[in-house]
Amino acid sequence: MSLSRRKFLKGLATTSAVSVIGPSLLAQAARAATEEASPYTADGVWKVSGSHWGAFRAHIYNGKVTEIKPLERDKYPTDMINGIKGIIYSPSRVRYPMVRLNWLKKHKYSGDTRGNNRFVRVTWDEALDLFYQELERIQKDYGPWALHAGMTGWRQTGQFHSCGNHMQRAVGMHGRFMTKVGDYSTGAGQTILPYVLGSTEVYAQGTSWPDILANSKTIILWANDPVKNTQVGWQCETHDSYGYYEQLKGKVKKGEIKVISIDPVRSKTQNYLGCDQLYVNPQTDLPLMLAIAHTLYKEALYDKKFIETYALGFDEFMPYVLGETKDKMEKTPEWAEPICGVKADQIRELARLMAKDRTQLIFGWSIQRQQHGEQPYWMGAVIAAMLGQIGLPGGGVSYSHHYSGVGIPPTGASGPGGFPRNVDEGKKPKWDNGDFKGYSSTIPVARWIDAILEPGKEINYNGSKVKLPETKMLVVSGCNPWHHHQDRNRMKTAFQKLQTVVTIEFAWTATCRFSDIVLPACTQFERNDIDLYGAYSASGILAMHKLVDPLYQSKTDFEIFTELCRRFGRHKEYTRGMDEMEWVRQLYDECREANKANFEMPEFDKFWADGVVDFGEGKNFVRHADFRQDPEINSLGTPSGFIEIFSRKIDRFGYEHCQGHPMWFEKAERSHGGPKSDKFPLWLQSCHPDQRLHSQMCESEEYRATYTVQGREPIYISPEDAKQRGISDGDLVRVYNERGQLLAGARVSDDYPPGVVRIHEGAWYGPLNEKLGAIDTYGDPNTLTMDVGSSELAQATSANTVVVEMEKFEGEVPPVTSFGGPIYES
Ligand code: PGD
Ligand code: PGD
Ligand code: 6MO
């Protein structure tokens, strides 16, 4: 690299479309070959399909799914396959188009009763007419700023029916709307890391497991539970990662690789691997990390040459660590010990171990879903830069190995495209009004409740100002905001202000309860589709055969929005004149064309009949190897092209809680002696569920019964904390803080240390009634979480910054109100 450029930069641095499988040639071909390729019983048929939980064969008899079993190729299927049938046949299915009683009868929006769950059944035509009239009214009386149709989430798999695309294309053909930037998963990480490493990293391919297994001597799983979290994938999951976990387990046992899980909780992965745990107080990883950096520096264990060649800003950062700037505290292990709860000597040992040999840092995402969540990710990159192993096989830092098969050697094949999300090129919405009246048309995703409550407020976001638009109407599809957002009582207050909420759903979630118009979508198991098999590995292409016809009066999202578009004469444009199977075939044919130079793919009919195209083994990949090889030619996407330990750009934003380099900031709430812990001594972590995908599958009755306690969501608690409160395993408990209260069932477990409790996110909210403060009868952790942005930079969710207290529940036990759908009125 040219010295002059480096010096220069250093200076700067500082209704069912296809109802019954008819006698079409296609369906006949599919049936014949599926029967051939799979065990066939005389009294039914087996069909191949796939899901977030993996690929499977489903047995259908008499129009009903009777059994689901993993596809033979899946060697490590998840237990959650057993919950799928219960999604289709859930008592909580949305059966008919429904309109909220008070909204319909009073038609003054009646926000005060929103959430009372009293609904009137209407016809499809009535429901769609109302939906259309409301869109018209909002665009006419207000403008695009008053409509929020931007939220997206974990829609079920399948590239054609990807429901957020359908909703946004159709609503977008009618008029513009406010949308969002970022997501709940990695909002802080994906915003900070482009400044530091030049890409989001969280959604990037990571070093392949064979390289890690062959080269790493130490693996640090930092706030990471991959054995739990790779059970699901954004596209149909192969579960091939588990083969590598198995090998890792063998190497841990033989002492060939040391794995340390830095986590307050003994995770599923730790229990599986039999690896070490380094306990850390919740939300205090930053002090631990700063003390590691201090040790590496003081003991001259860091790679000076790497820092000089590949990074900028070390000289601006180290004075903070050494206590020469800002808070004037030297970040010694002794300084860190009382905050993070790790003994100073242990911190030193850890730093030495990391520097001794090849070390791979692998972060999970939970620690960036907390206040100042940008900081641990930035600091992780700084430690990795100090260790000097970025770009080496089995070294450096990863932020993605627990996600969707990252680390399985990728084949490089192209996956099928999807149904278009946008209005076609050259076309304009019916209401062609782009005037947002000075409001921002895009807001950070987690700030949408702020927009309802404080319209016109200007907030900082990633170097710019965002003026929150006054939302009057929401359209929700493929996500469950009354699961995913924080602080239910605050949400209740906000929803009272809304005029109209339309939700398109197959499960009667709390979001439906707080809506005005609910349209019954069918599940993915009631439609034909196509998917990539293995989101990051691109292992193959999967046919998703419709198992049964849409139940009750449900329709595919495609059909629902075709009918909406018909109301303003744009249905032909919306569908492009194609039906479901024509779309699926086209997506396959385009994919086949894109792959033709490198991968053989059969003609569509054969693929559809076989169920899977397998692209074979992938090739190993080492993250950042090209940058290491030549940082000039393969510069990073950061402003300087180097790793930015100090970011001049961020520094210039002048933010309080995200400054020019990583720093420790105290949280608004923290256990173990932190703020508010005197009143609420327990940290509530709302990790991702072992037996659900967020809120999906909570409606699966029999499966839910395998983990609930007295019909409630479990709260995991340490034996010490349980004893102190007179709580026994299996007791019903009330969990509370200043924001809310909920009922849950106690599970006392040694995996949890004192001061830490867990309720998995996605537990269905079941308020006793729609009033503020009403107890949640099932155990949704977001009844208690705090709704503040991570910092001025990312404005991401801070779901994991929350403390609570709990007690054994005495008194009359209210029934669970979460499940079973609405109260039908006439
Ligand atoms: P899901 O439960 O998957 O959660 O939030 P998200 O909203 O994505 O909701 C998807 C909804 O879409 C379900 O209700 C499902 O029935 C519906 N749906 C699925 N497929 C279709 C379809 O084809 N058509 C239609 N019409 N509907 C469909 C997830 C979000 O939650 C995420 S990703 C994260 S990382 C966050 N995590 C946490 C956390 O760790 N802790 C807390 N406290 N809160 C969180 N919230 C966030
Ligand atoms: P979590 O389970 O919330 O997973 O992936 P993410 O990595 O966010 O947390 C992982 C670990 O972080 C836990 O063991 C927890 O104890 C630890 N942890 C939490 N806070 C701290 C802390 O302050 N310090 C330290 N050191 N450790 C901490 C989530 C990812 O999972 C996402 S975003 C999605 S959308 C997917 N969701 C699911 C799902 O819903 N269900 C399953 N089974 N799998 C999923 N995979 C994906
Ligand atoms: Mo997520």
Image (cartoon, rainbow, N blue to C red):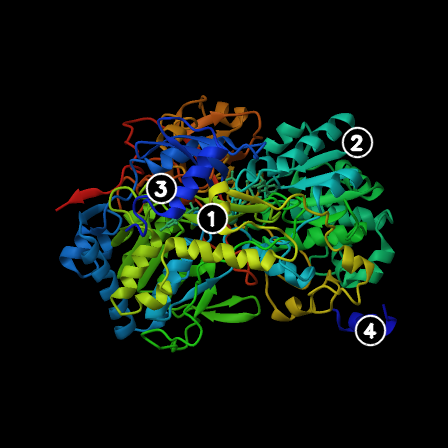
Residue 282 visible in the shown view = yes
Query: Mark 3: few, some, or many residues within 10 Å (few <14, many ≥20)?
Result: many
Counting from the top left corner in percent of width and height, residue 268 is at: 59, 31
Mark 1 or 3: the one toward you: 1
Q: Which residue is mark 3?
A: 765
Q: Is residue 202 left or right of residue 802?
A: right
- Residue at 51%, 57% (x, y): give it: 589
Mark 1 or mark 3, earlier in chain: 1
Q: Earlier in the sequence, mark 2 or mark 4?
A: 4
Q: Which tag is nearer the camera, tag 3 or tag 2?
A: 2
Residue corresponding to mark 4: 5
Tell me how many marks there are. Answer: 4
Residue 588 % position (x, y): 50, 54
Type of amino acid under label 2 = Glu
**Kind of residue sitting beneath label 3:** Tyr
Secondary element under disc 4, as helix, strand or loop, is helix
Q: Judge the density around disc 1: few (<14), some (14-19), many (≥20) Cα neighbours within 10 Å.
A: some
Ligand 2 in which quarter: top right
Q: Amino acid at mark 1?
A: Asp
Relative to 326, is 611 above or below?
above
Q: Secondary structure at mark 1?
A: helix
Query: Which residue position is annotated with label 2?
Result: 256
SS type, badge 2: loop
Q: Residue at x 59, y 34 (%)?
A: 265
User: Label 2 CB, ligand 2: below 8 Å?
Assistant: no
Q: CA distance from mark 3 to mark 4?
A: 56 Å
Q: On the rendered structure, is 701 left or right of 806?
A: left
